[in-house]
């Protein structure tokens, strides 16, 4: 998606540890017009796939998911980063290793919001090693829902998450794939 690539080039900042900062427009300050274009693009790609729910993870995925949901006219449900162990058994849980914080955390999703009747589009801002996505896919498997597709705003193509998900057969669409990044600049994969 050229518009997204342009914004990354104009405003993205490369930080130590291969972290790309895009907090001017994607995951802290939010450019709502850009998010609306992103939602339209995801709808163009997945709109005919029978999606009835959008699934994401707090916090950065939520705005992207909500703007996309406007185009699909379906609800959004997001996995929460758990602060305490659930003892009631009314939630699905999975453990995720955080790329940006370098530690493990649990995610939870109330069982009443996802089940075998659902066909979900999973969305997130970044795909790097694929750990967050694996946690969401684990929750999908526990719930018995169908994964209709995975939509990512920025895939870091030099990390293995994207290749692994494509290999596993998921319909994965990344609107921008960064193939290399350094202080000297970024390159995108042609697609
Ligand atoms: P993964 O689990 O695929 O390794 O990393 C994806 C998660 O880590 C995303 O939910 C995203 O929030 C965060 N993340 C990974 N790489 C980056 C990055 O370069 N920049 C930012 N801002 N977040 C990242």
Image: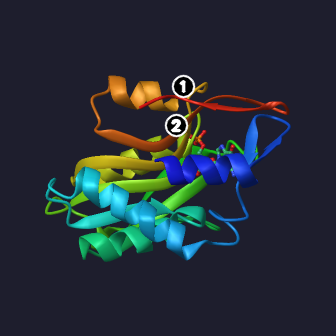
**Residue 135 on image: x %, y %:** 47, 46
Residue 79 seen in this snapshot? no
Disc marking residue 160: 1
**Residue 128 on image: x %, y %:** 59, 37
Q: Residue at x 69, y 46 (%)?
A: 9
In which quadrant is the C terminus drawn? top left
**Residue 36 on image: x %, y %:** 44, 70
Is 177 placed left or right of 43 in the picture?
A: right
Q: Nearer the viewer, residue 143 or 47?
A: 47
Quadrant housing residue 111 = bottom left
Q: Nearer the viewer, residue 43 or 160?
A: 43
What kind of colouring is applied to the model shown?
A: rainbow
Disc marking residue 130: 2
Residue 186 seen in this snapshot? yes
Q: Residue at x 54, y 25 (%)?
A: 160
Q: Residue at x 65, y 64 (%)?
A: 27
Dot 2 surroundings within 10 Å: few (below 14), some, or many (20 or more)? many
Distance from label 2 to label 1 (Cα)? 7 Å
Mark 2: which secondary structure?
loop
Mark 1: which secondary structure?
loop
**Residue 21 on image: x %, y %:** 75, 51
Q: Is residue 185 above or below residue 66?
A: above
Quadrant housing residue 180 = top right
Is 129 placed left or right of 173 in the picture?
A: right
Query: Ligand 1 within 8 A of label 1's CB?
Result: no
Query: Ligand 1 within 8 A of label 2's CB?
Result: yes
Quadrant housing residue 122 = bottom left
Is 7 placed left or right of 46 in the picture?
A: right
Dot 1 surroundings within 10 Å: few (below 14), some, or many (20 or more)? some
Q: How many numbered marks have been drawn onto this rendered protein structure?
A: 2
User: Do residues under tags 2 and 1 come within 8 Å of each other at their CB atoms?
Assistant: yes
Q: Is residue 59 above or below residue 154?
A: below
């Amino acid at each position: 998606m050229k518009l997204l690539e342009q914004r990354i080039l104009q405003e993205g900042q490369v930080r130590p540890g291969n972290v790309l900062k895009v907090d001017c427009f994607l995951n802290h300050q939010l450019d709502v017009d850009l998010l609306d274009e992103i939602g339209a693009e995801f709808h163009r790609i997945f709109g005919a796939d029978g999606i009835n729910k959008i699934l994401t993870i707090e916090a950065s995925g939520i705005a992207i998911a909500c703007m996309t949901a406007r185009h699909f006219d379906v609800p959004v449900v997001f996995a929460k980063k758990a602060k305490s162990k659930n003892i009631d058994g009314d939630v699905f849980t999975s453990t995720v290793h955080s790329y940006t914080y370098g530690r493990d955390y649990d995610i939870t999703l109330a069982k009443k919001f996802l089940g075998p009747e659902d066909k979900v589009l999973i969305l997130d801002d970044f795909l790097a090693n694929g750990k967050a996505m694996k946690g969401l896919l684990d929750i999908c498997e526990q719930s018995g829902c169908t994964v209709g597709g995975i939509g990512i705003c920025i895939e870091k193509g030099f990390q293995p998450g994207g290749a692994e998900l494509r290999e596993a057969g998921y319909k994965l669409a990344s609107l921008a794939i960064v193939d290399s990044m350094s202080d000297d600049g970024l390159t995108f994969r042609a697609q």
